Image (tube, helix red, strand yellow):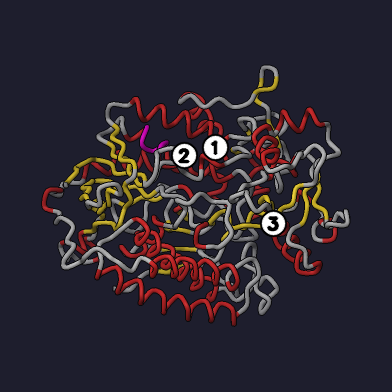
Amino acid sequence: MRIETDFLVIGSGIAGLSFALQAANSGKVAIVTKRDISESATKYAQGGIATVYSDEDSFDAHVDDTLVAGAGLCHEDVVRMVVEEGPQTIRNLIEWGVKFTTSGESYDLTREGGHSARRILHAEDITGREIERALVEAVRQHPNVSIYEYHIAIDLITAAKTEGVSPEENRCRGAYVLDIKNGNVCTFSSRITLLASGGAGKVYLYTCNPDVASGDGVAMAYRAGATIANMEFMQFHPTTLFHPLAKSFLISEAVRGEGAILRRRDGTAFMEKYHKLKDLAPRDIVARAIDNEMKISGDDSVFLDITHEPADFVRSRFPNIYQTCMEFGLDMTKDWLPVVPAAHYLCGGVYVNSNAETDIPGLYAIGETSCTGLHGANRLASNSLLEAAVYAGRAYIHASNAIRDVQHDLSSIPEWDSRTATNSDETVVVSQNWDEIRRFMWNYVGIVRSDKRLERAMHRIKLIQSEIQEYYWNFNVTSDLIELRNIATVAKLIVTCAQMRKESRGLHYTIDYPDRDDVNGIKDSFVKMKF
């Protein structure tokens, strides 16, 4: 099956949907998403979206907070651009139907760790769900948008691979996509392709990401020849609910922003010995502090305490978190919440310029799939939704102009060739390798690393990748196999970048190089496939 479109969008979170809504004004848009269109990391974002929306705040203050959190690796020009374009981006979201929480006649602004002012717009404590709702409704109503749910991209189609052109003449021409429900592979031909498939939390054993976060966009871009950057910087959210029945439920940063205190089991508040901001310290500091406290005590978790705040305030400010915790027998107005760190946000990704262009013409990347230079070595809370929405607009402006120069014949793209592949009766290979990758990534390439741990991880990933490669070419593709192949690729990229950085900075902490190196340390770590 062949589908021709002007814009192919892979992913359906705030990044992909924001771009699609704008691109639909310039041509036909196809959105490919591997589950229901609403199933994305955006849907689970609780805290909010950061922007300067108060006279008591300033662009300079937001820029400074972002630079401090980024531990010296943020690209300051990018930070200022995103911050200054933030307010208009918020207005766009509001025009598309997003309803942020108000206080009187103005929007209710909250504060999170690392922020020096209240600048987080939110929709109660289900901000992402509200943004996703509004954007999904808008794209469903647009006549130029076609939505392909339960379709998973396999690989990008490039002129270098299909036509044998030189790297200088290379161009992305779409993607091969598996229709999960019927098992057929579709050829999506497009003049512009946008990767907005989210992050890669499922590379780790413990994550607060949804199951769709298997690093698909990063892996596909790497295999196509795009530059990948800063993959060593995986952010671990400090406070994921620790409960046997809770599947990766996040306790928002905003809970600490409203006064919650981290405590040991004996009640001791411990963050003051790790950072002057105590419980409002940047996430990397908090995650390492919790990890250290758990190792010292031998406990399975630490505890988040907001019982000293008025019960009515807690219930009204965090209705979703309150209700979910109650379902697990925890009343956060009376009980301390057991919490542990979990893989949360990938600060690296496909390297792009200020217009979201990769180094493959016709291919753009935005949102968590991309590395823009905004986050540096550690993302400031609630900057991710902002970045995704800002870059969606910039990508649209550039792509809508660039598409006019695309003249190639999309019908010449070859169909998917399954060769002699057959259906597999050895799916245990997929589940075994999936589990093994996630376990050794957690143990060897987690919050605290070392040279030996990274060496062991690299040794294991190379063996597993050879098994996956053989399996991939012998059997028909399935969504599980595609995701396994992608998490293996992303795992290797994370380890490779971690081995390049001989210092501790931001989210990358190694016991062999515990200090930050501002003299000899590398700025950004780049990886590119050699053909």
**Nearer to us: label 3 or label 2:** 3
Q: Amino acid at mark 2?
A: Ile
> Which residues are the magenta region?
17-21
Residue sticking out furthest to the front: 425
Q: Which residue is mark 1?
A: 128
Answer yes or no: is residue 504 visible. no
Q: Residue at x 46, y 50 (%)?
A: 198
Mark 3 touches mark 1? (CB < 8 Å): no
**Nearer to us: label 2 or label 1:** 1
Q: Quadrant of the C terminus?
A: bottom left
Q: Mark 1 Cα within 10 Å, few/some/many (few <14, many 20+)?
A: many
Mark sitting earlier along the chain (3/2): 2
**Nearer to us: label 3 or label 1:** 3
Residue 42 lies in the magenta stretch? no
- Real-space Cα separation, disc 3 to disc 2, in angstroms: 27 Å
Residue sticking out furthest to the top: 105
Q: Amino acid at mark 1?
A: Gly
Q: Which residue is mark 3?
A: 340
Position of residue 139 measured from the top left corner of the image (x, y, whole percent): 37, 30
Mark sitting earlier along the chain (3/1): 1
- Real-space Cα separation, disc 2 to disc 1, in angstroms: 8 Å
Q: Which residue is mark 2?
A: 14
Q: Left or right: 116 with respect to 483?
A: right
Position of residue 298 measured from the top left corner of the image (x, y, whole percent): 78, 68
Dot 1 falls on a residue whose secondary structure is helix
